[in-house]
Image (cartoon, rainbow, N blue to C red):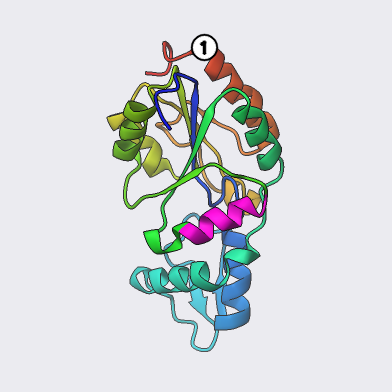
Amino acid sequence: MGMSGRPLLITDCDEVLLHMVGPFQTWLDRDHAIDFDLEGENFEGALVRRHDASVVQPGEIWPLLDAFFTNQMHSQTLVPHADRALATIAEVADIVVLTNITEQFHAGRVDQLAALDIRHRVQCNQGGKGEPIARLVEEFQPSVTVFVDDTPFHHGSVAKYAPEVWRLHMIAEPRVAVRRPPAPDAHARIDDWSDALPWILGRFGEGVKAAA
């Protein structure tokens, strides 16, 4: 693929296309006797073991996330309206799912999305998304690019490395969204796909001139 000259949507997966923290919370509670407080200001210190009230340290969270993605991807549910929005966008644009999981989970993520009738290129990533997005823009040569992600850090990374890309901050989990301010490096914050769709199509219509 590539060099189509069509608009390009680059979207995150977890908490944008698929719910993740809710199923993760349920699994931690059921299988690990860990309470995960989604209502906190951030996830540092949000995981607490019930048997001794000890806080799960950041270095201990990654193995839990690995185990979750290894065994529990099937428990992730579609974010409302995401499939219909992507189907509409796909009529006029190319779509890439850029997801910060390791390559070992690539096939599982492709299958997981395909089961929900979402069939687009899936690219795994580690670290900031700005540089891989700059490479995707170089590959596709799109007329305009829109990026959707729930993590402010990635919007800052894209603003640095691919400033011409439109940046939409979306947090699909309401319990988290209510606690998180809009990402300072995003052009807009919209947490529902039914509202995000016209915004994205509007950016496609405007082109790159106003993004940077």
Q: Is residue 33 visible?
A: no
Q: Nearer the viewer, residue 179 or 212?
A: 212
- Residue 108: in magenta span: yes
**Residue 127 drawn at (x, y percent):** 31, 50
Q: Nearer the viewer, residue 196 or 110?
A: 110
What residue would you read off at disc 1?
206
- Residue at left offset 66%, top offset 55%: 115
Q: Nearer the viewer, residue 196 or 69?
A: 69
Of all residues shown, which one is farthest toward the bottom?
A: 51
Q: Which residue range is magenta in the image?
A: 107-116
Q: Quadrant of the C terminus?
A: top left
Give amino acid for label 1.
Answer: Glu
**Residue 11 drawn at (x, y percent):** 50, 39
- Residue at left offset 57%, top offset 60%: 21
Disc 1 on helix, strand or loop? helix
**Residue 172 drawn at (x, y percent):** 61, 46
